[in-house]
Image (spheres, grey):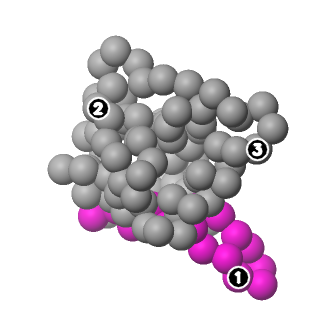
Amino acid sequence: MTITLTPKAAEKVREMMKAPGQDAAAGLRVKVVGGGCSGLSYQLALERQAAEADKVYESQGVRIFLDPKSALFVGGTQIDYEESVMAQGFAFKNPNSKGSCGCGSSFTA
């Protein structure tokens, strides 16, 4: 199963890749780590290249780097970028999530 970006999320990632100091970024690292109020949390980072064991996907013209362990938790996930009066940030629509906290960046699988 792949991981995808909405057009708005891809636009935001490309904008971040053009920021000063990020000119060598080649893709978006999506990682799942232990922690957060629900047990697992998402981490995003811009990276210069994929690691040897990474799965590499492309969505909306953006390369996505995913390590094998994280891939177990985020297959089929769609990443969006949402903006409201109260907050802005990336939002994850993960079909593997059995529950999440109010912040939207922590989940249970």
Magenta region, residue range = 79-97
| Vertical side of 98 occupied by 109: above or below | above
Question: Which secondary structure lies at badge 2?
Answer: strand
Question: Which secondary structure lies at badge 1?
Answer: loop
**Separation of residues labelled 1 and 2 (CA atoms):** 32 Å
Asked whether the residues under the numbered discs 1 and 2 touch, taking CB atoms below 8 Å apart as contact, a structural biologist would say no
Residue at screen point 51% across, 41% down: 28
Badge 1 or badge 2: first in the primary sequence: 2
* Residue at the disc numbered 2: 55
* Residue at the disc numbered 1: 84
Question: Which secondary structure lies at badge 3?
Answer: loop
Asked whether the residues under the numbered discs 3 and 2 touch, taking CB atoms below 8 Å apart as contact, a structural biologist would say no
**Separation of residues labelled 1 and 3 (CA atoms):** 23 Å
* Disc 1 crowd, CA 10 A, few/some/many (<14, 14-19, 20+): few
Badge 1 or badge 3: first in the primary sequence: 3
| Vertical side of 34 occupied by 92: above or below | below
* Residue at the limit of the structure toward the right, as seen here: 20
* Residue at the disc numbered 3: 19
Residue at screen point 50% across, 37% down: 27
Tag 1: amino acid = Ser
Q: Position of residue 36 (x, y in %)?
A: 57, 48
Q: Position of residue 37 (x, y in %)?
A: 56, 54
Residue at screen point 74% across, 73% down: 87
* Residue at the limit of the structure toward the bottom, as seen here: 85
Q: Position of residue 14 (x, y in %)?
A: 59, 52
Badge 3 or badge 2: first in the primary sequence: 3
